[in-house]
Image (tube, helix red, strand yellow):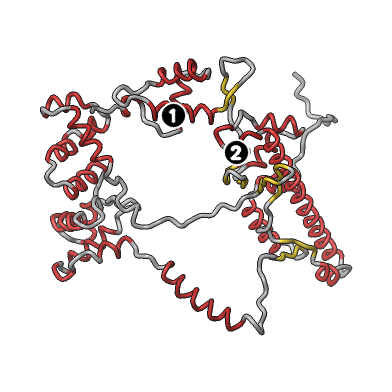
Amino acid sequence: MDLRAGLWQQQTLKLAMTQELSQAIALLQYSTQELAAFLEDKALENPLLKIENVNVKPMNPLIDRNRKKHQKTEKDWIEQIADKPFSLEEYLISQLKITNLTADQMKVIRHLIKNLDENGYFTGNLNEIAHKLRMDLEIVEECLAIIQTLEPAGIGARNLQECLLMQCYYKNPDNELAQTILSNYFVPFAEKKWKPIAKELGVSLKDLQGIFDEIQQFNPKPAGLLFQEVTTYIIPDAIIEQTNEGLTVRLYDEFLPRIRFNESYYQKFQNQNQQVNRFLQDKVQDYQWILKSIEQRKETLTKVVAKIVEKQPAFFAKGREYLIPMTMKEIANELDIHESTVSRAVREKYVQTPNGTFPLKTFFTSTIQTISDEESTSSTQVKKEISLLVAKENKEKPLSDQDMAEQLKHQKGILVSRRTVAKYREQLKIPSSSKRKRFN
């Protein structure tokens, strides 16, 4: 091996990821909302890029001033109500008869409430809290017991077992069998290992089925219903419409701010000195690259959505159950682009169709073989068939994954393995056959 130092020339071919190329790739995968935020940020960096928010209409000062002022006042007090919901602490404290509690008890209770998670479970350590507040452990335990008497039932529980048991005492205090099962047989009962329980307690499987059905009505997250989540709205990136000529595709960019070149700024500062001119040229190039990247994004996204429409006519005509197998590689080959480009184009983007609004990734499903060599089906269709089989099965003898695989083969001509059925069943959040079994 020659280890001598020296200089050699070597010619290689490699792909250089320029800043402009990186920016074009980033813009392609941005959703409409992300792209709008990107342009707003760019306008702060580049003085030659001017943002025009076309959705903001100017007010007529002669006509609208008084009306706008009245509307703003009305809107302000309405929004103040919505913006100040009760906190979990306020909701629980409002139920207490403060006159019957000492100052120390109220102090401890407020501290304990701060240790409740968003589902209403107590996550703190009673010994640590007693030490921190310099209170006897018995007082802290009594205060937690007080919290557990409040509504909603199950609040302040330390685990799921205690939460369900508290709700059982609250909703049906005379059901001693349910209380015994939750106290002493919680894990095997949840796993539906009922025969040993029934034998030991001297009850029938039908009795245990009734207890199970009752417990199913309990809320495992008692604080979850107190506060509604903020409603999120989906803004589609593309719209597919049915017209007399057929289905048409258009990008929904009304929420995108319009950008234009700040000519006045450019004319004001050009030709001042070499450093300023270099700065302006860099910003001009940046502006031009943004325009080009946006146009490329628009063109690529339109082509991809149009190809989806072309490949999935049954979906738009009849509904989601008629979605046929289609992969990103298939679309990429037909559009003569890279598969990663298709992946970026559909990332976190939604399309509004005559059948509803869907993520673009919905249209890409794996191919499932059928008995007929000329036909295939999609994973979406297989999941639908699995759901139908479970809905129609005899609940006293539910179908196993192997049974469903056999029925799909013989009844629908769909070739899937037991493991595939199990995977799809879990994705549909359908329990296993042992947990679906009922004793009537």
**Image x and y of residue 234, in percent:** 56, 52
Of 290 and 324, the residue lying toward us: 324
Residue 347 lies, with reference to residue 228, above or below; the image says: above
Q: Residue at x 30, y 45 (%)?
A: 220
Tell me which label, 1 or 2, sits earlier in the chain: 2
Of 52 and 63, the residue lying toward us: 63
Identify the disc placed on residue 56: none
* Residue corresponding to mark 1: 388
Q: Which residue is drawn at 76% across and 53% down?
A: 290
Label 2 Cα neighbours within 10 Å, binned few <14 / some 14-19 / many ≥20:
some
**Image x and y of residue 268, in percent:** 84, 72
Indicate which label's residue lies in the foreground, 1 or 2: 1
Give the side of residue 251 with respect to residue 153, left or right: right
Give the side of residue 84 with respect to residue 269, left or right: left
Residue type marked 1: Leu
Of 334 and 22, the residue lying toward us: 334
Give the side of residue 73 with respect to residue 249, left or right: left
**Image x and y of residue 27, in percent:** 69, 48
Of 220 and 172, the residue lying toward us: 172
Numbered disc 1: secondary structure = helix
Residue type marked 2: Lys
Report the number of numbered marks: 2
Residue 75 lies, with reference to residue 420, above or below; the image says: below
Q: Which residue is drawn at 45% across and 27% down?
A: 386
Image quarter of residue 15:
top right
Identify the image quadrant of the C terminus.
Answer: top left
Numbered disc 2: secondary structure = helix
Identify the disc placed on residue 361: 2
Label 1 Cα neighbours within 10 Å, binned few <14 / some 14-19 / many ≥20:
few
- Give the farthest residue toward the right: 271
